[in-house]
Image (cartoon, rainbow, N blue to C red):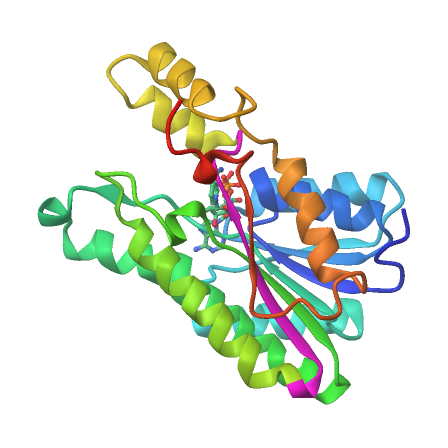
Amino acid sequence: MDRLNDKTAIITGGARGIGAAVAEAFSREGASVVIADSNAADGAAMAERLRDSGHLAAFVPADVSDPAAVQAMSDSALGELGRVDILVTCAGRNVFAEPLETDPDQWREALAVNLEGTWNCMRAVIPGMLENGAGSIVAIASVHAFSVIPGTFPYPVAKHALLGLVRSVGVEYAARGLRVNAIAPGYIDTQPVRDYWRGSPKPAEAERRTLQMHPPRRIGRPEEVAMTAVFLASDEAPFINAECIVVDGGRSALYHD
Ligand SMILES: NC(=O)c1ccc[n+]([C@@H]2O[C@H](COP(=O)([O-])OP(=O)(O)OC[C@H]3O[C@@H](n4cnc5c(N)ncnc54)[C@H](O)[C@@H]3O)[C@@H](O)[C@H]2O)c1
């Protein structure tokens, strides 16, 4: 409790899944939050739920792939919050294909949302953070930033590049009070993972196999990513910068069973 007292945060993709868990955890830890999401119905409902629990929360609709919309969202968030201490970028989309079957729209969407969307948000908030001499940015990457599941192209291309973005911006502005870090979740129990299983020929078997391949024999919960985001965003991590924390139950470290 109170680990983010008096802090203000913009959380993209906060309408559901990992972003919603981040919004809840940040609120619980004392932050005032603005949820930015392209899903207006779920985003507004999420902010209302937080307000009903006594937290300071607002929703601002925005498609992160649209730089002008992101700038308008950031201006509006600044009006709500007074200043922006923290940005957590959770907005992302699975765009999965076999490389040679990927059409140009899929390529563009994967990079526009997962990579450029994060940069659009960073670019909008960083000038204010530099003025304040402080700011913490946490980007939700993926284990797809290091490794690849065949048939998921071009999502890993975007996530690999996202790590490059985090490290570049983190190094660039460290001397002016900014920290920029990433979290690389493995399988986390959210709707896209359930949709991925459902899309396989034998969904129950696909789910069972996924749970089995993780050392704890389960996948992660959104709250477990959110707890890491709280840590990275908070004053408990003052010398962690341009880094990425893997949250996958040890799956990436496993050679084989
Ligand atoms: N769930 C996992 O297993 C997992 C693993 C690794 C990384 N991730 C990453 O975590 C992030 C959140 O994933 P999730 O599983 O919670 O997904 P989710 O689909 O439940 O939530 C994503 C949210 O982002 C929003 N969004 C999508 N495109 C947007 C856009 N263009 N502009 C604004 N908002 C947009 C959606 O409306 C939704 O509310 C993503 O970046 C994803 O790549 C997820």
Residue 186 located within the stretch drawn in magenta: yes
Q: Pick whichever, 225 or 28, lies toward us.
A: 225
- Judge by depth and name the residue closer to the eye, 174 or 154: 174
Residue 16 in the figure: left or right of residue 144: right
Could you tell whether 100 is left or right of 238 in the image?
left
Is residue 110 found left or right of 207 in the rendered image? left
Q: Which residue is at 62% across, 70% downward?
A: 241
Indicate yes or no whether the magenta region holds residue 104.
no
Query: Residue 192: x percent and y percent?
Result: 43, 34
Kindly tell me whether residue 16 is visible in this rendering: no
- Point out residue 198 in the picture as x, y percentages from the top left corner: 35, 20
Hey, which residue is sitting farthest left in the picture?
100
Residue at 38% across / 17% down in the picture?
Answer: 209
Residue at point 23%, 56% (across, down) = 107
Q: Position of residue 109 (x, y in %)?
A: 30, 56
Asked whether the viewer can see residue 13, the reply is: yes
Compared to residue 96, the image places residue 30 above or below, namely below
124 up-or-down from 38: above or below: below
Where's residue 193, x and y in %?
A: 43, 30
Q: Toward which corner of the image does residue 131 lie, by quadrant?
A: bottom right
Q: Tell me the quarter of the image containing the C terminus.
A: top left
How many marks the image carries: the answer is: 0
Q: Please give the range of residues in magenta.
A: 175-189
Of residue 215 and residue 119, the one placed in the foreground of this image is 215
